[in-house]
Amino acid sequence: MSQETPNPATAVEQQVGEAADYEITGNVILTAMASGFVGTVLMLPVLVGIPELLGLFTTEPITRFAGMAAFFGYEPTLALGAFLFGIGGVVVLPVTFVVVGAFLPPESPKYLRGVSFATLYWVGFVPAFWPQADAFVILSFLVFSLLAHWVYGLSLGYLLDLFADIPQHEV
């Protein structure tokens, strides 16, 4: 009779062993950061280029974003704001995605989880970079910034899934 009943300890060991295929390694982190760099570069034409061509882009929100540097004694500048924006897109967001990407929809294809992730971050981006302008500029800001974040998330998710796989965590 004991041969017919599966051993629960064996079942748990098998599940834990399967989850080990998706460890967060240095390779996964570096791939995520490289993917974040590509995503940041690809989103800039949509986030900055098109609005600049339409005369809608101003640098004031980027400088205002660098205002957090005043806490450390640095003067907020456009260059510092752009640097912090780049660090966020290349380091902070990709590493965060490696950790939380497994819990985001959709289940398949996994690379679209990058779009879900970027949409969540867009919700925080909007108030941080909100333009003080008329309704047309605000609507344009919302559309272009959302599209840019989707470009970022799609490239982050796709490249990470292609070259290193999006880690899947057991909960």
Image (cartoon, rainbow, N blue to C red):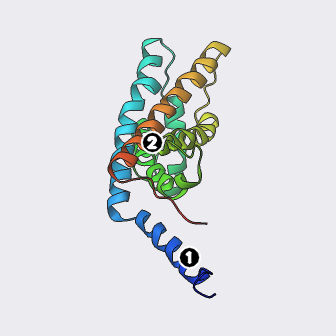
Measuring from the top left, give residue 50's x and y in whole percent: 44, 17
Which amino acid, mark 1? Ala
Return the mark for residue 70.
none
Q: Furthest residue to the front?
A: 1
Q: Residue 11 carries which label?
A: 1
Residue at disc 1, secondary structure: helix
Mark 2 or mark 1, which is nearer to you? 1
Q: Residue at x 40, y 43 (%)?
A: 86
- Quadrant of image for the C terminus: bottom right
Q: In the rendered view, does 111 fall on the left or right side of 33?
A: right
Q: Which residue bears the numbered disc 2?
A: 85
> Height in image: 131 above or below 89?
above
Q: Is residue 153 above or below residue 3?
A: above
Residue 76 in the image: state x and y as whole percent: 48, 42
| Badge 2 or badge 1: first in the primary sequence | 1
**Local crowd at mark 2 within 10 Å, few (<14), some, or many (≥20)?**
some
Residue located 41% across and 48% down the image: 87
The residue sitting at 51% across, 78% down in the picture is 13
Given the current orientation, which residue lies at the most extreme bottom position? 2
Q: In the image, is 129 to the left or to the right of 148?
A: right
Three-letter code, disc 2: Phe
Q: Which of 105 and 127 is in front in this view?
A: 105
Q: Which residue is drawn at 55% across and 44% down?
A: 117
Quarter of the image containing the N terminus?
bottom right
